[in-house]
Image: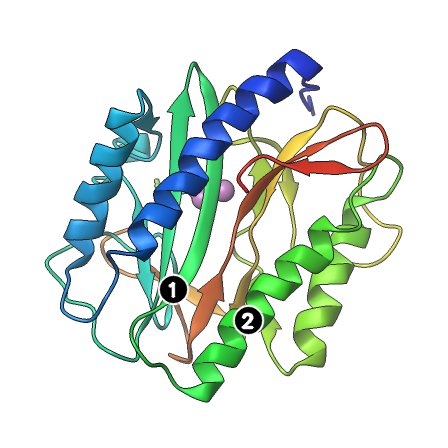
Amino acid sequence: MTIKKYTKEDFKLLKLAGKITSNSLNYIEKIIKPGISTNLIDEEINNFLKKNNAYSAPLFYRGYPKSVCTSINHVVCHGIPSEKILNEGDIVNVDVTAVLNGYHGDASKTFCVGDVSIKAKKLVQTTYESMMEGINIIKPGIKLGDLGFAIQSYAEARGFSVVRDFCGHGVGKSFHEEPNILHYGKKGEGIEILEGMVFTVEPMINEGNYETKVLKDGWTAVTKDKTLSAQFEHTVGVTNNGFEIFTL
Ligand code: MF3
Ligand code: CO
Ligand code: CO
């Protein structure tokens, strides 16, 4: 297993790529409302990235047909934009990976479409907080299991479950690098986190059971029990004494 170590110079470039990714999510937040299609989200973000001299990593990645992933309600991840219209009360995750100067910034947010139910709000809020619980403990010397434990214990204490079938990943000069970042685990287990590592933290949290299945399109992952699923994602670099979030 080879885990890349990135330099301070790389960190500057990763931050530039991350900034475009996070700016595109802020931009799309203003466009998301009941009545728009997920294709519009895809087009708007693709144009936004182009205007900023970046491009979308997912487009044509392993045959993926669109520029972003749009995952609605019980879709866990990798939802494909289409003519499908967002309705009041939906939750939709938009996942963007921008490439700038060969560096990747990978982030996602789950947005509420108009007014959503209290339980949906609680799931979305808890998913964001779970991600931050994990990120906030990152520093050299801790184990990946510590990170997974922080996320899992926070989510489960609030009655939700952590998806096992998809995980975070190293990222930087390539879209998906080693290691895998599990969002569940036991304290003290797994490899040690070291300065210079760059990876995503992107927990998918379900209202019901953690089990998922992939639909016939080969991409769309849904909860088996059809309950809601939310996700947030940041790209993070490990510094000498902590972490830096590149996609703020
Ligand atoms: N951006 C997703 C991630 O967080 C991956 C999407 S792969 C795609 O890793 F092909 F579906 F776009
Ligand atoms: Co990712
Ligand atoms: Co992503």
Residue 49, position as x, y percentages in the image: 29, 31
Q: Nearer the viewer, residue 60 or 109?
A: 109
Displayed quadrant of residue 241: top right
Identify the residue at horizontal 58%, vertical 60% (top origin): 164
Quarter of the image where the N terminus is located: top right
Q: Secondary structure at mark 2?
A: helix
The residue lying at 33 percent from left, 81 percent from top is 115
Q: Is the C-beta separation of discs 2 and 1 under 8 Å?
A: no
> Residue 34 at what x, y percent from top left?
19, 71
What residue did someone put label 1 on?
Answer: 111
Give the crowd class for mark 1: few <14, some 14-19, many >=20 residues within 10 Å: many
Q: Is residue 69 above or below residue 32?
A: above
- Left or right of 15? Residue 23 is left
> In the rendering, which numbered label is found on residue 224?
none
Q: Residue at x 79, y 26 (%)?
A: 195
Please identify the quarter of the rendering in which residue 79 is found. Answer: bottom left
Dot 2, how many residues are within 10 Å of its Cα: few (below 14), some (14-19), or many (20+)? some
Query: Given the current orientation, which residue lies at the most extreme bottom position?
Result: 118
Q: Quadrant of ligand 3?
A: top left
Looking at the picture, tell me which residue is in the foreground, 89 or 228.
Answer: 89
Mark 2–mark 1 distance (CA, rounded to whole Å):
10 Å
Is the CB–ligand 3 distance for label 1 below 8 Å?
Answer: no
Name the quadrant containing residue 170. top right
Which element carries disc 1, helix, strand or loop?
Answer: strand
Relative to 172, does residue 47 appear above or below in the rendering? Answer: below
**Would you say 125 lies left or right of 137 here?**
left
Mark on residue 125? 2
* Residue 21 % position (x, y): 42, 37
Residue at image position (46%, 87%) is 118
- Amino acid carrying mark 1 in the image: Phe
